[in-house]
Image: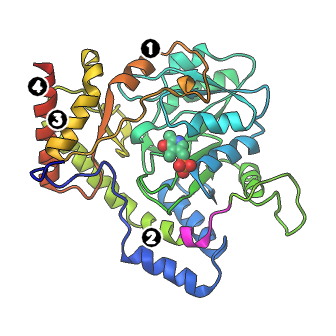
Amino acid sequence: MTQATPDFIPPAKPIIGDEERAAVDRVLQSGMVAQGPEVAAFEAEFADVLVAGRPCVAVNSGTSGLHLGLLAAGIGPGDEVIVPAFTFAATGNAVRLTGATPVFADIDLDTYCLEPASVEALVTDRTKAIMPVHLYGHPAPMDELGRIAETHGLMVFEDAAQAHGAAWNGRPVGTFGAFGMFSLYPTKNMTSGEGGMVSVDSEAMGRGVRLLRNQGMERQYENEVVGFNNRMTDLHAAIGRVQLTKVGAWTRQRQENAAFLDAGLRGVTTPVVREGAVHVYHQYTVRLSEDLAGARGAILDRLKNEFGVGTGVYYPIPTNELPSFQQPADLPHTKIAAATVFSLPVHPSLTREDLERIVDGVNTVVGEARA
Ligand SMILES: *Cc1c(COP(=O)(O)O)cnc(C)c1O
């Protein structure tokens, strides 16, 4: 970078303030830092604020949440779970780790979420569940997916890792399926440091996840099932409780930032918000025309070097094509998205000047690439 480069605008910026530090200090001073009263309070508060009071179980990561939820639902070898390939690998990993087979469906190119017709075409007599991802913070089409699940007797598990506060027809994500998982990784819309929250539709599901996160024990040394240590600590829960009081305002700021970008950007396909959807813009993801796919790397380099605009590509390789999966599948929309998307900063710390610079950078660099 040359000296004339403007201050770098990072693609994501976790906000951790004095209140979070004070909360951690309070727990440290108590001398009890493992899973305890802070985790219990965080679960209850998360339920109230984000999932309309559905019971919640905290775990040490979003990935563990998916994994334990699947196991608690009885998913295992011989079962198939339909998932998108256009997502973070954790979605498919969680299915694979149970011994079940992830079956990869295509996405809708407007919202980058599962395309119901593609899902329905993949249902077999081994299919046990559909796991939609509310990608970038836009809800998957839960009514159509719910109908498919009902028709074929399938469970629904929501990967809401990126979608705290998103909603579909007035109902928050995480309240549609047998379970919904929220990640609390630092770059997500709210964080606990590392962590995950699972909202559940039944006491049996909740108990299953609670047992699996703690060595299969409800009462000490009376292990009922073989489990993990996937507990959240009170230190992390204390951070998450503070963040929970702020996530609503942060979401509104993300939505305002997105509206500014929507109005200003030229030459790229900006995010579509379906009627009835509340988009919480974990990512603000745009798409280049396909003829510019080969220029994406150079475009993002120019945005960084000349305009100081950080970007990310989520996700350049569909899960089914990763070395860890290698499951050939015909997913034309997934291929297009993987080759053409990139995400711009939309986080709540952006200033008006930052947003103007992002718009100016994209319009200049993409405009020149198209010329
Ligand atoms: C972040 C993420 C996960 C995993 O969450 P971790 O807390 O990082 O384990 C799973 N699915 C999606 C779509 C994610 O973005």
Q: Which of marks 2 and 3 is in front?
A: 3
Q: Where is residue 222 in the image (x, y as percent from the top left)?
A: 90, 64
Question: Residue 332: which numbered mark, if any?
Answer: 1
Quadrant of residue 61 within the rendered picture: bottom right
The first of marks 2 and 4 along the sequence is 2
Q: Distance between the residues labelled 1 and 4?
A: 28 Å
In this picture, residue 21 sits left or right of residue 268: right
Q: What residue type is labelled 2?
A: Val
Find residue 230 and report its horizontal and vertical position in percent. Answer: 69, 57
Of labels 1 and 4, earlier in sequence is 1
Residues marked 1 and 4 touching at CB (< 8 Å): no
Which region shows up in magenta?
Answer: 231-237
The answer to whether any part of residue 173 appears in the image is: no
Q: Which of 32 and 205 is in front in this view?
A: 32
Identify the residue at image location x=56%, y=20%.
119
Q: Name the residue under label 4.
A: 368
Q: How is the image coloured?
A: rainbow
Q: Which mark is residue 242?
A: 2
Specify the quadrant of the image occupied by residue 268. Answer: top left
Label 3 secondary element: helix
Q: Please, what secondary structure does the residue beneath circle 1 have? A: helix
Q: Residue 63 carries which label?
A: none
Marks 2 and 1 sit apart, C-alpha to C-alpha, by 42 Å
Rendered image quadrant of residue 217? bottom right
